[in-house]
């Protein structure tokens, strides 16, 4: 049962990683935003942008529960070890961010320390209430109210719209790109996470993932079939309403004459709710497929889900030089269709290579290093022995 539980979460994590990779490919690892054009990218962004990242956050919260639960069953307290584990992950994320400033490892690791506080709350209803508060979008609502009240800081253009590092990525040298990624290129990303409400939303997803682990949701997914159907209906209704009714909603809000800034924050709030409902739909669809006769269709995602760190970093090492100015500079040479086909082929290759790798090794190289440093041991099995 535990194996089934973890394999299902591996599938969710693997699907999320491949979906996130496809988003990165269509946006040429962020260079698309220097001159965005309508096309296939819009559909990919609609389906996966924000939602894939949110799925990874949900799985992160669940993985925290698994580690803490296993240690508790052995009569050990994993708190200090998990804090050390997050510190290592922060360092890994720092070096990856030098290559690709859109790195999410640092973000997931940094917010992960809050899980150590949430773990002390034994009442799951309290955790769900806190998650619901995070999902409402308190920071965006605050910005809407502040902007409507005439607060100067809330009526300024979002900081994340100012991206002085973009010209460096487009035409600069490798040294210039690395230098920009130390600070200048990172600032817009962190402003976006803060101003868009994404930081708070991730905390909510962490809490939900932890509660799903506590309640055995993944271990006994079949027992929650009715609840999943109800949740699917609600999430689908919300997603469809927000997608097809967003123009009407934003027009209605604009008619209240709260100002341009308040309108902008309201649009971001609607977008955050849409992404959250989309995340829920993808998670429920994947669980339903796993529980049904089409399990084999999504089973291959399990392997890439076990090699998430290695593959995530490898994707950047391969494709950032392909798109960026210090490499081949193909960000404006490949059409959106070409980026889609190359991304699809790369996903297929990762699915195959991950399955082959795990036949011979227990972990990916980055996962093994992370685990060895977590326990400060070099005898962690790596190569599979016959």
Image (cartoon, rainbow, N blue to C red):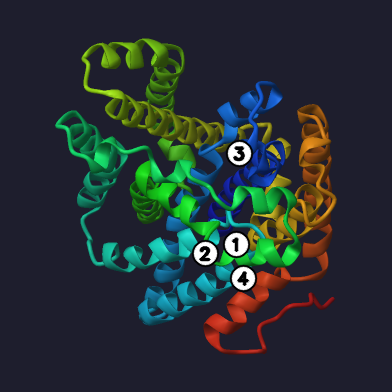
Residue 270 picture quarter: top left
Residue 225 picture quarter: top left
The quarter in which the C terminus is drawn is bottom right
Q: Which residue is mark 3?
A: 290
**Residue 320 sits above or below residue 358 on the image:** above
Q: Is residue 26 visible?
A: yes
Residue in front for this viewpoint, 150 or 342: 150
Mark 2 crowdedness (10 Å alpha carbons): few <14, some 14-19, many ≥20: some
Contact flag, marks 3 and 1 (Cβ < 8 Å): no
**Residue 258 sits above or below residue 338 on the image:** above
Residue mark closest to the camera, 4 vs 3: 4
The percent position of residue 131, horizontal first and vertical second, equals 29, 46
Mark 3 crowdedness (10 Å alpha carbons): few <14, some 14-19, many ≥20: many
Q: Which residue is mark 4?
A: 95
**Numbered mark located on residue 145 in the image:** none
Q: Which residue is mark 2?
A: 183
On screen, residue 278 versus residue 329, left or right, reads: left
Q: Which residue is mark 1?
A: 180
Q: Secondary structure at mark 3?
A: helix
**Residue 259 sits above or below residue 52 on the image:** above
Contact flag, marks 1 and 4 (Cβ < 8 Å): no
The percent position of residue 14, horizontal first and vertical second, equals 64, 49
Instruction: Tell me which numbered mark, 1 or 4, is placed earlier along the sequence.
Output: 4
Contact flag, marks 1 and 2 (Cβ < 8 Å): yes
Q: Is residue 219 visible?
A: no
On screen, residue 75 versus residue 252, left or right, reads: right
Instruction: Tell me which numbered mark, 2 or 3, is placed earlier along the sequence.
Output: 2
Mark 4–mark 3 Cα distance, whole angstroms, equals 35 Å
């Amino acid at each position: 049962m535990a194996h089934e539980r973890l394999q299902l979460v591996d599938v969710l994590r693997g699907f999320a990683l491949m979906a996130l990779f496809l988003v990165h490919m269509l946006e040429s690892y962020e260079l698309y935003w220097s001159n965005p054009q309508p096309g296939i990218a819009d559909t990919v962004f609609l389906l996966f942008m924000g939602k894939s990242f949110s799925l990874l956050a949900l799985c992160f919260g669940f993985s925290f529960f698994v580690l803490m639960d296993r240690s508790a069953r052995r009569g050990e307290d994993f708190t200090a070890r998990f804090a050390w584990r997050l510190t290592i992950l922060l360092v890994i994320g720092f070096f990856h961010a030098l290559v690709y400033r859109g790195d999410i490892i640092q973000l997931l690791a940094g917010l992960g320390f809050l899980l150590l506080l949430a773990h002390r709350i034994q009442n799951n209803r309290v955790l769900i209430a806190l998650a619901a508060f995070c999902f409402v979008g308190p920071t965006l609502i605050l910005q809407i109210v502040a902007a409507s009240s005439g607060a100067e800081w809330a009526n300024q253009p979002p900081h994340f719209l100012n991206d002085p590092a973009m010209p460096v990525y487009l035409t600069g040298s490798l040294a210039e790109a690395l230098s920009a990624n130390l600070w200048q290129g990172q600032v817009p990303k962190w402003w976006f996470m803060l101003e868009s409400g994404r930081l708070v939303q991730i905390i909510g997803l962490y809490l939900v993932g932890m509660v799903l682990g506590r309640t055995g949701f993944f271990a006994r997914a079949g027992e929650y079939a009715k609840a999943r159907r109800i949740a699917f209906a609600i999430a689908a209704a919300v997603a469809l309403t927000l997608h097809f009714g967003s123009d009407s909603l934003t027009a209605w809000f604009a008619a209240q004459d709260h100002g341009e800034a308040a309108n902008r924050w309201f649009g971001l709030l609607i977008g955050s709710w849409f992404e959250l409902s989309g995340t829920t739909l993808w998670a429920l669809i994947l669980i339903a497929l796993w529980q049904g006769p089409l399990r084999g269709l999504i089973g291959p995602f399990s392997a890439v889900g076990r090699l998430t760190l290695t593959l995530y970093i490898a994707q950047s090492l391969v494709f950032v030089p392909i798109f960026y100015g210090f490499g081949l500079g193909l960000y404006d040479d490949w059409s959106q269709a070409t980026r889609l086909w190359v991304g699809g082929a790369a996903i297929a290759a990762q699915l195959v290579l991950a399955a082959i790798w795990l036949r011979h090794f227990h972990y990916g190289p980055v996962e093994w290093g992370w685990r060895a440093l977590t326990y400060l041991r070099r005898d962690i099995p790596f190569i599979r022995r016959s």
